Structure formats: C-alpha cells, structure tokens
Amino acid sequence: MKKVPFVTKQQLDEIVKDYPTPFHLYDEKGIRENARRVNKAFSWNKGFREYFAVKATPNPFILKILQEEGCGTDCSSLTELMMSDVCGFKGHDIMFSSNDTPAEDFKLASKLGAIINLDDISHIEFLEQVTGAIPETICCRFNTGGEFKISTSIMDTPGEAKYGFTREQLTEGFKILKEKGVKTFGLHAFLASNTKTNEYYPALARILFKTAVELKEETGADIKFINLSGGVGVPYHPDEEPNDIEAIGEGVRQAYEEILVSAGMDDVAIFTEMGRFMLAPYGHLITKAIHEKKIFKDYIGLDACACNLMRPAMYGAYHHITVAGKEDMPCDHKYDVTGSLCENNDKFAVDRMLPKIDIGDYIIIHDTGAHGFSMGYNYNGKLRSAEVLLKEDGSTQLIRRAETPADYFATFDFTGMFDKYTKQYK
Ligand SMILES: *Cc1c(COP(=O)(O)O)cnc(C)c1O
C-alpha cells in the first residue's frame, strides 16, 4: 500500500517556523480514529479494554488522548506508573506488566491500586514482602515455552524468552495466590512481536482461553480477564499488508464462543496492551537533509540520528522515507540516509531509491509514533528532540520541548561548572 504522510510540504513549511527540526510529530486525528476502530472491533466483549503500553510513547498528552478514547495504561516501570497517576489513571485503569521488577516499582503499583501482572512465581513472595500484602485482583504472565507456531510458520520462540510462568508454575502459583486471599484472577501472555497476520491474537487467545478453563478446574480460581498483551504489528514497508483489527476482533470472538462460553466462562473480559498498533503509524520523525557526501556510495546526512529513532540501527528495521514535496517525483536516486553518530549503523536507510534530494529538503520518516522517541538516548552527547502534536483542527502543540545542553549537563554534581554554556537555556 502506498505510504502517504499525514502532513503536506505546505503544512511542514509552517510547522518548522515554530519548531526547528528534528522533531517527532503525532497525528491526533489518526490516533483517535484508530483507537475507536480497536474499541469497536472488541465491542462484542462487555469488559474489553485496551491498556496502552506507555513505553511505546511515554507522553502525557498522548496518554490523555487515549484516556479520552477509553483506554487504560500498561506500565513497565516506576516513572511510567508516576506518569499514569499524574494523568489521572486510577486503580484498575493501570496494568503493571513488568519483569525483573524492582521493589519500589511494586510498592508504587500497589499503592496506586494498579492490576499487577506477575512475571514469575517467585514474585508472589517478593510482592508480599515489599508491599505487605497480595492484592485481591492479580494477573499472571504465561510463557508457553518451545516455539510459537501459527499453522506451520514459526512466529517466535517463547522458550528462549525470559518472561512469564511455565504451565506447571501457573497451577502452583494460582493455588498459592488463592490461599493468600486473591479473589479475581487474570491471565496474560505475549508470544510474538510486530505480527503481520490477523491470526496472531486469535491463536494466542485460544491458548489462553484453554489454559484459563484448565486453571479454573484445577484451582477453582475465578478468572475474570484475559490479557492478550501487545504484538499486533503495523506495515512499516509499503509491500506489507496492514492488519485488519476488525477481523482480529472477530477471530478472538469466535475463540471466546468456542472455548470460554462453552465452559460457562462467559463473563471474562478481554484486555489488550498494544503500543505499536495504537501509535506507530501516527508519528513521523521530521528531519532535514543537511549534507550530501559522495564517496563509494552516495550519502544524505540528516539532522536526526539513531538517538531519535533507534530501530533501523538496532534491528535493521525498515522505516519508509518521504521527501516532503517530492511525493510524486521518480525514485531514481540510490542513497544511504544517515545520522551523525560515530557508529556506522547510524543509517535510517541503506541503498534506498528516493527522488533526488537537495540540501534543505524536509525528510519524513514514517511510522515513528511508537518505540521511536521513547527508545531515544544521549550517545555522542546528542540531545532528545521535541515532540509536537498535530491537532485535529490542523494547529500544532508542543507536547515535549527539545532537550538543551542544560538538561544534558544537569546530572553532574558540579553546580555552575557549565554555566557558561547552559545559562542561556535556563
Ligand atoms: C512492549 C510490550 C507491550 C506493547 O507491545 P507492542 O508490540 O508495542 O504492541 C505490551 N505489553 C508488554 C508486557 C510489553 O512488554
């Protein structure tokens, strides 16, 4: 499918007058419409709720938009819990799905009354020790082990993943939790990431539904929700088929009818914890071409780097690139599109066919709305960019300012040492 940016060159010419490149731009309209499609696809389930995975796009303004669309938050750390709290997510609006969890994170999750999703059987005792009690509602994460297959194709290898309880540990864990006073149980699993098939959630749901029926029989646990977690992918490449969330919702509904309703468990809520599917397509990294270099290959140097978007460097991930205003020009130039890090993997694209790029052209990097800004870092002393919201009425709002050198130097304990460089930013 042809990839079209959600901003035009004309709009960008205006936006860059207020916000210098590089910055992440988010499309409020796209975010809201997609969230509504998700809710509609699962509207057959009375208790359905999407808990947005905060780690994908940890910005309070984005969380507020999703809150207005009925979403909760899925947190993995102390600061994500703090952000959810400050944004007005209360109690069971918050899912806490973390692993290798520090004590202080459990303490805050417990204080906020979040639904805690335990990653390991040993965390039952740990949680009780650090918080003084096991909450009445709890969730456990299941690792099916081995390979996870859909039809004949291997989607992922949970047996190699550090997450979750084994099947035997679930039975034991549920029994222990029941003895400790848990009244309401949930079951969670995350078996494959960035999936490109409508079969993923339904296949995962079948596994979790069957397991829930078994666990109820074995332990008498009252299982009230099944958390399908994240993993629903987006088409980063124009050749990829987009997932159809309506078909995914329908696939889960069929599994629900067949397995849960038949077993008399017709009051189980479905939860999801999507990050990528909720946000990735509705973010662009807006950058500018600042250098062209011709040696053994032709390089276009941008004012953004892997610190602004790590996925290409880290996973060799494809992110589509549009040269603003040259959407309809022939892609007859082959470029490596780079950032300025002293790392040769700092390339947004390798051997990419693009229209002829001129210095000063605005370069739009697609699908950066999730796991984009949030995976940013400060290597080479690079500063994090701004985040800008393109609102439904076409106006823009700065939803996070860019870092300044004062931010970068703020954690050194030599007060005043950098004043000569940082005063102007205070
Ligand atoms: C990362 C993560 C998610 C979100 O995953 P996406 O692929 O962005 O949908 C959800 N739940 C947990 C526990 C995660 O670690």
Image: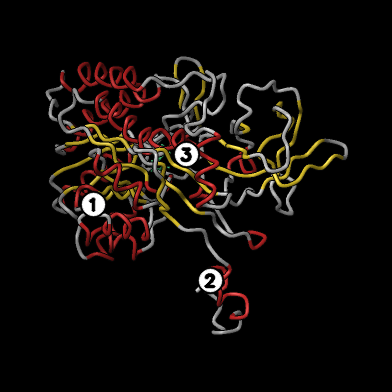
Q: Earlier in the sequence, mark 2 or mark 1?
A: 1
Say what secondary structure mark 2 lies in. helix
Mark 1 residue type: Phe
Q: Which residue is mark 3?
A: 283
Task: Name which residue lies at 70% across and 27% down.
Answer: 355
Q: Is residue 324 left or right of residue 216?
A: right
For residue 89, the mark is: 1
Is residue 142 at least partly visible in the picture? Answer: no
Q: Looking at this view, is 103 or 304 the one in front?
A: 304
| Left or right: 38 in relation to 223 | right
Which numbered disc, 2 or 3, marks the residue closer to the eye?
Answer: 2
Q: Is residue 73 above or below residue 253?
A: below
Label 3 CB sits under 8 Å from any ligand 1 atom: no
Colour mode of the rendering: secondary structure
The three-letter code of the residue at mark 3 reads Gly
Residue labelled with disc 2:
425
Q: Residues within 10 Å of mark 1 (few under 14, many from 20)?
A: many
Cα separation, mark 1 vs mark 3, equals 23 Å
Residue depicted at 19% across the width and 61% down the height = 133
